[in-house]
């Protein structure tokens, strides 16, 4: 661990890296029109001599670039396969396509990488109650890891959370608070109740250390490709934490001299709810549509500043895709790759199809992050 500080992505203020940090005290949580003052974790990259610690396991193999150096009481996390998808690559006109298979994570979702850091930090502070808001995946991840550690998970879900996801939460023994509103309302409720109760915050947009766990997926992709990053990495975008984290991970590999280049980032949203697509293209207007991609049905992305910073650094872009295109991509993933992805994760393939209409993908390598495998 070479942690050196925290910096607000909104006002630029620097802070010392206290382990229970949240948002920038000056900027606060924002209000839907103003962005929250999210903090970025910084390291002294000159001190990183080897990115991989071969004596550690899972995400802690990259502990020199994590905010904690030893795993707490966590389920094994990381080490998911990179699946070559030659048939789908041909269909998309790519030289190579790989699927980073986060379905193989402990609770079937990339969210586990953030939860692993949250559980480790909470345990280090002797805190055994953790909370988050989620359409399902982050909540299930927290619930599963808490069940394993003997901790308590308090999860806030939207009124329309799927019965499948509620079933998982029940089985893991979480306290489930069903909001009368959407994800954005559940998020606000979680912050009010969680802060008042003094629970540990597992909301990835507000706890700056959690994206550090998510960025390990970038380290793994790079290592699995023998430190030659792909041309494009594609992920679905909700709050923006996941793709923002992936961008940070690749950027740090260049900063420490482990790779020479970083991939372009492609963020994908459903056309029915695409605030980041609008924002990236400078369009105004409110989101008024809907999507079956429940995990990314986010009206006010809370980590927009982080994602915008990484998109800019990586020469990335945001694209929206329609419901039918997502549905067809989900079927293609199953029929051409043997991969049953959740609806949200199939946006990656629909996004690559759309990208091909803007950019030549001939000779290019892409990685689609199959963020989750829970089929509702
Ligand atoms: C399966 C899946 N993919 C992608 C995302 C998007 O992640 P983020 O909200 O960090 O942008 C989520 C979570 O919200 C998710 O559950
Ligand atoms: Zn600030």
Image (tube, rainbow, N blue to C red):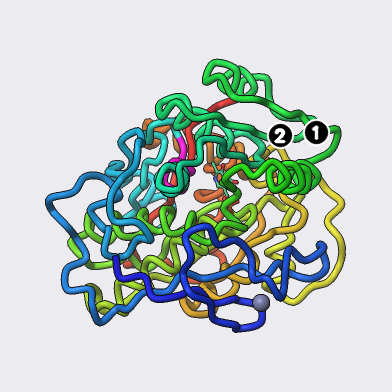
Q: Is residue 331 visible?
A: no
Residue at the (76%, 29%) spot, across then down? 178
* Residue 318 picture location, percent across and down: 61, 65
The residue to which callout 1 is attached is 179
The answer to whether residue 113 is magenta is yes
Q: Nearer the viewer, residue 293 or 210?
A: 210
Whole-angstrom CA distance, mark 1 to mark 2, is 6 Å
Q: Can residue 153 be seen in this view?
A: yes
Q: Is residue 84 left or right of residue 338?
A: left
Q: Residues within 10 Å of mark 2 (few under 14, many from 20)?
A: many
Give the dominant element type of the magenta stretch: helix, strand or loop: helix
Q: Residues within 10 Å of mark 1 (few under 14, many from 20)?
A: many
Q: Which of 335 and 138 is in front in this view?
A: 138
Q: Which quadrant is home to the N terminus?
A: bottom left
Q: Which of 216 and 188 is in front in this view?
A: 188
Disc 1, SS = loop
The residue to which callout 2 is attached is 157
Residue at the (83%, 68%) spot, across then down? 33
Q: Is residue 41 above or below residue 237?
A: below
Q: In this view, does 13 lie above or below 77?
A: below
* Residue 341 picture location, percent across and down: 48, 35
Q: Give the range drawn in magenta.
A: 109-114
Ligand 2 shows up in the quarter that is bottom right
Disc 2, SS = strand
The answer to whether residue 307 is magenta is no
Numbered circle sitting on residue 260: none
């Amino acid at each position: 661990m070479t942690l050196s500080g925290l910096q607000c992505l909104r006002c630029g203020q620097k802070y010392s890296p206290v382990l229970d940090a949240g948002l920038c005290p000056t900027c606060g949580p924002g209000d839907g029109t103003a962005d929250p003052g999210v903090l970025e974790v910084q390291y002294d990259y000159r001190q990183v001599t080897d990115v991989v610690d071969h004596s550690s396991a899972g995400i802690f193999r990259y502990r020199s670039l994590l905010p904690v150096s030893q795993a707490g009481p966590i389920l094994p996390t990381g080490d998911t396969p990179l699946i070559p998808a030659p048939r789908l690559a041909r269909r998309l006109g790519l030289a190579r396509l790989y699927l980073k298979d986060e379905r193989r994570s402990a609770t079937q979702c990339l969210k586990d990488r953030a939860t692993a850091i949250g559980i480790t930090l909470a345990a280090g502070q002797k805190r055994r109650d953790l909370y988050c808001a989620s359409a399902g995946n982050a909540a299930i991840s927290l619930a599963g890891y808490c069940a394993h550690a003997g901790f308590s998970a308090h999860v806030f879900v939207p009124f329309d959370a799927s019965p499948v996801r509620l079933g998982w939460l029940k089985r893991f023994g979480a306290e489930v608070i069903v909001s009368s509103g959407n994800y954005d309302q559940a998020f606000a409720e979680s912050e009010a109740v969680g802060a008042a109760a003094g629970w540990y915050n597992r909301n990835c947009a507000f706890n700056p250390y959690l994206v550090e766990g998510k960025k390990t997926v970038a380290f793994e992709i790079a290592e699995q490709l023998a430190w030659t990053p792909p041309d494009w990495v594609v992920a679905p975008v909700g709050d923006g934490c996941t793709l923002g984290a992936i961008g940070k991970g690749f950027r740090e590999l260049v900063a420490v001299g482990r790779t020479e280049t970083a991939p372009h980032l492609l963020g994908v949203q459903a056309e029915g709810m695409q605030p980041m697509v609008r924002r990236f293209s400078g369009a105004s207007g409110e989101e008024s549509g809907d999507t079956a991609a429940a995990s990314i049905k986010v009206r006010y992305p809370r980590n927009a500043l982080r994602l915008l910073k990484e998109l800019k650094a990586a020469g990335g872009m945001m694209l929206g895709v329609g419901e039918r295109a997502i549905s067809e991509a989900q079927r293609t993933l199953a029929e051409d790759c043997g991969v049953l992805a959740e609806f949200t994760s199939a946006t990656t393939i629909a996004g690559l199809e759309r990208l091909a209409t803007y950019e030549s993908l001939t000779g290019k390598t892409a990685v689609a992050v199959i963020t989750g495998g829970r089929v509702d």
